[in-house]
Structures are given as structure tokens and as C-alpha cells.
Amino acid sequence: MTPSAPELAVKSSHIPRRPKITPPKPRKDISTPTIALGEIPNLQILNEKGEISDPSHEPKLEAAELLRIYRAMVLTRKLDTRMLTMQRQGEMGTFAPGMGQEATQIGQIYPLTKKDWFAPSYRSFGAQLWRGWTIEGLMLLWAGFFEGFEVPEGVNDLPFSIVVGSHVPLAGGIAIGIKQRRDDAVVVTNFGDGAISQGAVNEAFNFAAVYKAPVVFVCENNGYAISMPTDKQVATPDLARRGPGFGVPAIRVDGNDVLAMIVATTEAVQMARAGDGPSLIEAVTYRMSLHTTADDPKVYRRDEEVEQWQAKCPIARFEKYLMNKGLLDPQAIGRLGDECEQEVLEARTRFRERAKAKPREVFDMMYEELPPELEQQKREYLAKLDRKGVQ
């Protein structure tokens, strides 16, 4: 295993019951205690074999709820796979696949309610679907139609940001506004390991800590910032260490373990809602597919590394757990997979009905009143469309 694909030690047994996310304690094995980095708790509940590592941390979820979580993860991957095919066929623009990060996606927003807020990065399909975004809406978004960015009615989400880390201060600002109104809503925002080196993200940590803003920062550490491995980007092996430096309690979670993600995020949300301020969750996961559809990961990582992480697949792990509980069997897995595939295909049909280019509207979304030079360009452009017979 290379340093760029960090292994997550199973140390959940030493995490206090309340709170699980705690400020670090000085390490006794550091020879120069004046520069103590502190010890970050690690959490894994479900191991790669689908077995419970620590029964004391297993969330008490009903069977129907466990199956709902599993279905959301499967649907996320079906959409991801279908959109990749559509992009290769010219129906979709460049987008960021999230294969391998389904547990991180669903787990981080699981405890949120309707009144809570979510500020996503661009690799958040599963989380957006759970929050109420439609499949065809996400397809429109990535196909370049502005309608796709419209947040669904009744959903307190921001449209995702392409600029790395730029949405994180906005999440902190919303959280500060919530506190000013004395509301008890919470904000969750996610970002990749590359974004944690952005100044805007670190400024967001600082402001949130100073104002005790009710925001949960989720760093999805998938091993690479595009092509840059984590060990070449940062000197500290645990990105969660950034939190305590700003006064933000942190925890490091197995991001391929959906139960651990749910437990950690639930604890963080409860802390924020109780007025205890922000927290940072580092979700250690892996991007099994491309950074974007314009990327070739074979240039910067070995096939052996990918194969090792495929064995840690979050969906396969959760399947084993559900089968061990008698909630799934191979036939049920097949049926549910077919249902999710059909749901995606039906959404693709609706997407195709709506995905009609409107070249005459190009200038309409820029200004309420066009400047004279753009008025001239618009007249020339429309005249050209008329000559070509384009409606």
C-alpha cells in the first residue's frame, strides 16, 4: 500500500462514548512535547468482511432503514456508471465520477433534516439524490444546461462549486447566520483532500471556530488531489490534524464504512445543534474511477493500488453486513440493482426530452440590460443563426 492510499487503523474502542469527536490529547511518545500534534481518534465499525469491529458503536437502525441506505448507495453507483457511458457517447459534458465514495456520500448527510443545509463539492451525486435532487436534474447540470443548477423546492442546498474549496467559506457563513438567528439548523459541507490546502478552506475553519458556527466539515480524502498523492501534498499523514490547530475537534473515519460515517456525522451534527460549534471529519476513502472524465489515472497510480482498494468497496462491504443479518440474498441484490438501473434509464429519457439546445438564449442570462457592445454582438449572432436556419 502506498502512502497515497492511507490505511485506517481500527482504534474505535478508545473513543469516548460522549462525545466521540474530542479535542486531541498530548501524545506521550513524542520526545519534544512542546510541539505536540495530538492524537486524532479513528473510527471503523464495519470491516472489509462485513463484520462489526466494535458492537458498542453499531447504530441501532431498523431493517427498512438499512435497506434504504443500501439502495441509495446502489442508485448512486448506477447513476455514476450510466453517466460515464453517456459522456463517452457525447451526451454528457465532463463530470467527476464518485465510484468508491458511496458510503462517504450517504453517511455524511444521513442525519440532516429538512431545515438543515448542505454545501456540496462537485463529487456529490449520492448526497444530492438523498437530499432531493432528481437524476435528470443532475444529468442536465452536467450536460451544461443551467436548469440543472436550480435547487429543488424545499431543499436547503447550495449548487455545487467547481472552484476547489470556494464553497466552504459560504457554508461557514450560512452557519454563522443560523447562529445569529438563534436557529438550531446545522450545515454540512464536503470537500476533497486537495481543497484542504486552499486558503479559503482554512479561513473557514478559523471563522467557524471563533464564532462556534454550527457547521460540520467533511474532508473526503480519496488519496489524490487530481493527480497529486496526499503524501506529496501535505506533511501530516492525517488531514484531520488540521482541525485542532484552529480549535475544531476532529475525527478520522473509515470512509468506506457507511455505518461509521453515519455515527460520526450524527455525533458532529448533534454537537453543532447543541451549540458546541464546528467539527471536522476526515473520511478516508478512495476514488476508484477518474478524477474527471478528462483524466487518465493510469498516468499517476498503479493498477495494484486500485485493486487493493476495490477489495474495500463500500457497497460490497455493506452487502455482506446485510446478508449476515439476513436482510439480503443474491436474488434480492440482483432485483434491487435492476430497479435502480431502470430508475436511471427512465430519468435519462426525461433528460433527453428536456436537453434541447437553445442557442438564441445565449445572451439572455448575462445582464438585465445588455451593454451596447454586447447588443451589437447579439444582433450579429442572431443574424448568423437566421442565415443558417437555426431556431
Image (cartoon, rainbow, N blue to C red):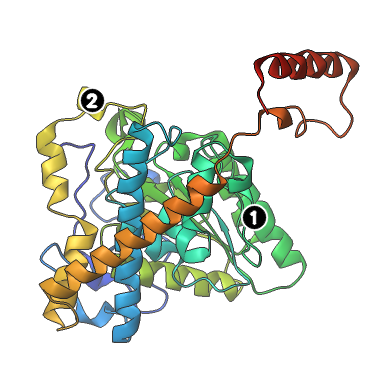
Instruction: Examine the rendered structure and indicate whether residue 35 appears above or below residue 224.
Output: below
Q: CA distance from mark 2 to mark 1?
A: 39 Å
Mark 2 lies on a secondary structure that is loop
Residue labelled with disc 2 = 300
At a point 76% along the width and 65% down the height, the residue shown is 180
Tell me if mark 2 has few (under 14), some (14-19) or many (20+) residues whose alpha carbon lies within 10 angstroms of its own. few
Instruction: Examine the rendered structure and indicate whether residue 34 appears above or below residue 391.
Output: below
The three-letter amino acid code for the residue at tag 1 is Val
Instruction: Examine the rendered structure and indicate whether residue 139 appears above or below residue 360.
Output: below
Q: Quadrant of the N terminus?
A: top left
Which one is nearer the viewer's eye here, 233 or 329? Answer: 329
Residue 133 rendering spot, x and y as whole percentages: 53, 59
Q: Quadrant of residue 376?
A: top right
Q: Quadrant of residue 252?
A: bottom left
Residue 202 rendering spot, x and y as whole percentages: 54, 42
In the rendered structure, find residue 210 and report the number of the disc placed on it: 1
Residue 143 rendering spot, x and y as whole percentages: 50, 38
